[in-house]
Image (spheres, grey):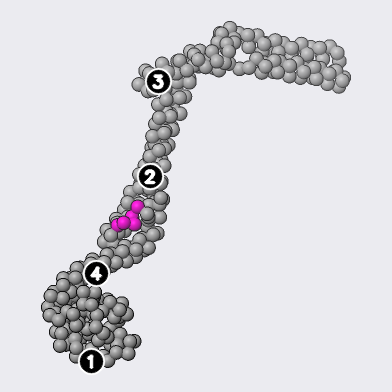
């Protein structure tokens, strides 16, 4: 369902008021979106700052996340391979076996130093040898403790982001709907105007029908010779109780529901005349307009 459909029942006047207020509403929503996006950026910066501080504290306490032992193996292999290649190249270039061996020993010394340094690091940080799941368990436990000290929940970051993002999403949805409404105001106002005109006509017609019914009953009471009643239009003898009330001057052409403008006629003539003026009706049926006009005036009607 589009927002335009939500306003289909609005009156023309109410739509005009809304059309005047809409630009301010759109401007207000755009400002709210901008403020929330700025708030989201600041929140992200705060999250990064808090997480960095917590990570630093945790790593100082339990060490960095363990590296895969395969990395150490690959590093050692590449180091030895490089030393072998260096020795071969130096020997091949004529440096002599002694120089080549001395160089190799130097490189091997560096390799041994690196290995010992790695062993020392592992001795200082025993958790490095632990499984990844164990490290993560300790990490999350410490992180939760730090968050608790800061009066923050474990899912604080996600909750705040979700709240802000939901508000932004809702505002963007409203903004799209109001822009759509802005583009559809012309159509909505035209529909409202036509709907109100039809309602007025219906109310007028209803009132006219009610008035017509009352006048017909009064006219029936005023006719003495009901058995010999003739239709004033076609002059045929009919059953007066089956007669219908006709507006001499049609309602849709400004005719009123008054005793002077209503006459009892037969059902056929009323059906044929419909919304025609008396003169057009007479011309269509071949009736004598002057004769009918005289008969109507004698009955007290205005022609």
Q: Please state which of the two labelled residues, at mark 1 or mark 4, is closer to the viewer.
A: 1
Give residue 241's position: percent from left, percent from top: 21, 74
Q: Secondary structure at mark 1?
A: helix
Residue 63 visible somewhere in the drawing: no
- Contact between labelled residues 3 and 4, with CB atoms less than 8 Å apart: no
Work out whether mark 4 precedes mark 3 in sequence or the reverse, and give the earlier one: 3
Q: Secondary structure at mark 2?
A: helix
Work out whether mark 2 precedes mark 3 in sequence or the reverse, and give the earlier one: 3
- Contact between labelled residues 4 and 1, with CB atoms less than 8 Å apart: no
Q: Label 2 vs label 3: CA separation?
A: 31 Å
Q: Which mark is residue 291?
A: 1
Instruction: Rate crowding at label 4 as few (under 14), some (14 to 19) or many (20 or more) other CA atoms within 10 Å.
Output: some
Q: Which mark is residue 201?
A: none
Work out whether mark 1 precedes mark 4 in sequence or the reverse, and give the earlier one: 4
Where is residue 292, by image quadrant? bottom left
Say if 272 sits above or below 153 in the image: below
Seen from the viewer's position, the closer of residues 82 and 50 is 50
Instruction: Rate crowding at label 1 as few (under 14), some (14 to 19) or many (20 or more) other CA atoms within 10 Å.
Output: few
The residue that disc 3 covers is: 147
Seen from the viewer's position, the closer of residues 52 and 37 is 37
The magenta segment is: 6-10
Q: Which mark is residue 205?
A: 4
Where is residue 128, by image quadrant? top right
Position of residue 50 in the picture relative to residue 256 (left or right): right
């Amino acid at each position: 369902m589009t927002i335009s459909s939500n306003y289909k029942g609005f009156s023309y006047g109410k739509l005009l008021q809304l059309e005047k207020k809409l630009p301010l509403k759109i401007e207000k929503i755009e400002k709210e979106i901008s403020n929330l996006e700025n708030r989201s950026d600041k929140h992200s910066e705060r999250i990064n700052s808090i997480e960095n501080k917590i990570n630093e504290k945790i790593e100082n306490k339990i060490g960095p996340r363990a590296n895969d032992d395969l990395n150490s193996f690959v590093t050692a292999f590449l180091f030895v391979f490089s030393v072998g290649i260096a020795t071969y190249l130096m020997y091949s270039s004529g440096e002599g076996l002694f120089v080549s061996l001395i160089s190799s020993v130097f490189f091997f010394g560096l390799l041994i130093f690196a290995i010992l340094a790695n062993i020392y690091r592992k001795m200082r940080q025993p958790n490095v040898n632990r499984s990844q799941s164990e490290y993560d368990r300790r990490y999350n436990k410490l992180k939760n403790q730090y968050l608790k000290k800061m009066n923050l929940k474990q899912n604080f970051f996600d909750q705040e982001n979700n709240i802000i993002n939901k508000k932004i999403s809702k505002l963007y949805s409203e903004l799209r709907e109001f822009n759509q409404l802005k583009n559809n105001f012309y159509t909505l106002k035209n529909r409202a105007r036509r709907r109100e005109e039809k309602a007025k006509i219906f109310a007028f017609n209803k009132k006219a029908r009610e008035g017509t019914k009352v006048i017909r009953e009064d006219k029936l009471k005023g006719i003495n010779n009901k058995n010999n009643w003739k239709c004033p239009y076609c002059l045929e003898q009919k059953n007066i109780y089956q007669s219908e009330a006709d507006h001499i001057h049609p309602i849709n052409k400004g005719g009123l529901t008054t005793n002077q403008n209503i006459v009892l006629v037969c059902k056929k003539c009323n059906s044929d005349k419909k919304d025609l003026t008396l003169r057009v009706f007479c011309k269509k049926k071949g009736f004598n307009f002057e004769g009918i006009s005289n008969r109507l005036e004698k009955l007290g009607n205005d022609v």
